[in-house]
Image (tube, rainbow, N blue to C red):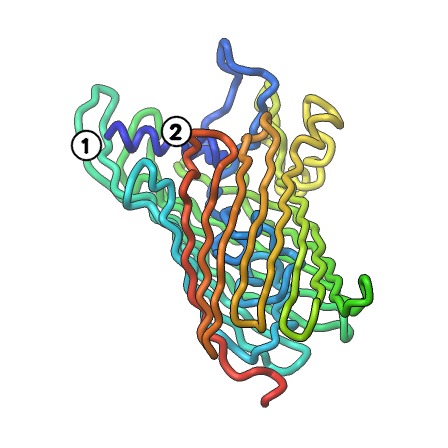
Amino acid sequence: MRNRLIILTTILTYFSVNVYAQNSGTISGQDTDRNVIATAVPFLTIAPDPVSGAMGDVGVATTPDINSTFWNPAKLTFINQNSGLGLTFTPWLKKYVDDMSLSYLSGYKKLDDEQAFGAALTYFNLGDIELTNGNGQPIGSFTPREFAISASYSRKLSDNLSIGVTGKYILSNLSGNITTSPVTDPKPGTSIAADIGIYHNQQITVFNKQSLLALGASITNIGSKISYNSADEEDFIPTNLRIGSSLSSFLDPYNKITLALDLNKLMVPTPQADGSHRDKGLLAGMFGSFGDAPGGFKEEIQEIMYSVGAEYEYRETFALRAGYFYEHVNKGNRKYFTAGVGFKLQKLELNFSYLVPQLQEHPLAETLRFGAIFNFTKSEDK
């Protein structure tokens, strides 16, 4: 039970989940400079795949692949293959427990050179938890689970520009039907959300080397608030703005290097001392998130997260990857290095990533991601 309490505390601290939509007032002695933005279903912001996971969580403008449904649906139509299936698995917070995990199943199909469909299932298992009442007496056990089902469509507007949209259904079941004080009439939280994205690439020459410059932007998880009980209490889901670019240079016919940068910001109201941020609607919360920080422009800048990544690829069969993710200390303080490798064996691609936090004893330490991708006929072979 103690480990489970640590896990729930970790989730609250590092992933900004507010499980039962409780107000987050300032506690006596608390560092008032820290003002972490809290949302429900934070699993929607976890990088699900070991390719981006090895490159500091970049993804909005990187090489289009099967995981584009998560990062930027506009990239789907630029995938070189005709169709594919992928599965990734991430043991989560394994330093504390051994039964939490994030699984991601995805697939895509190109209708022609200008259109593509994608679909994905994200499943977050929080492990078994023994629940107790206010007196510490057992009242049952439960396995909290969350998932999101997504469907995407991407279309080219020109040879170099595409747009994409995603619709998704989200379910978060954190307590089943077990009532625990002060929560009454608990129920699973649900939401309907959408993603939109745009992607552009252009052939250029850098130091006499053929290169591909790509730009991308996406807004993900645009959707209704979530409630976990019958009371009029709702939490925002993690609506997120991501913009980025990548540059891939071909050193010779066999060697390629890619550099990528993403900037990331939650389009969710910044917590206010009087709790008024909780009363905002979806659109007011999204567009107001660029100017509602109590600390003014300085705090708004602190809400931007930075991801940088690099990849070396040899003959499209072997890849080495590395990256870094930065989040300001007042907004969550996630800072970590990442690394990984990838192998392509004809139609099968295997990828692995490893996370090394900058801070000691960080709960994300030793995070491993494993992924397999099955690519089918190349588009040009049709």
Residue that numbered label 1 is attached to: 139
Amino acid under label 1? Ile
Q: Earlier in the sequence, mark 1 or mark 2?
A: 2
Residue drawn at point x = 44 percent, y = 57 percent: 352
Q: Residue at x 41, y 30 (%)?
A: 361
The answer to whether residue 272 is above or below residue 313 is above
Q: Whole-percent x and y of residue 330?
A: 59, 25
Mark-to-mark CA distance, 1 and 2 = 20 Å
Figure check: 278 above or below 92: above
Of residue 255 and residue 143, the one placed in the foreground of this image is 255
- Quadrant where the C terminus is found in the figure: bottom right
User: Is 206 displayed left or right of 286 in the figure?
Assistant: right
Quarter of the image for residue 214 reads bottom right
Foreground mark, 1 or 2? Answer: 2
Could one spot residue 231 in this view of the protein?
no
Q: Residue 9, labelled with which disc? A: 2
The 10 Å Cα crowd at callout 2, few under 14, some 14 to 19, many 20 or more, is few
Residue 72 horizontal side relative to residue 134, left or right = right
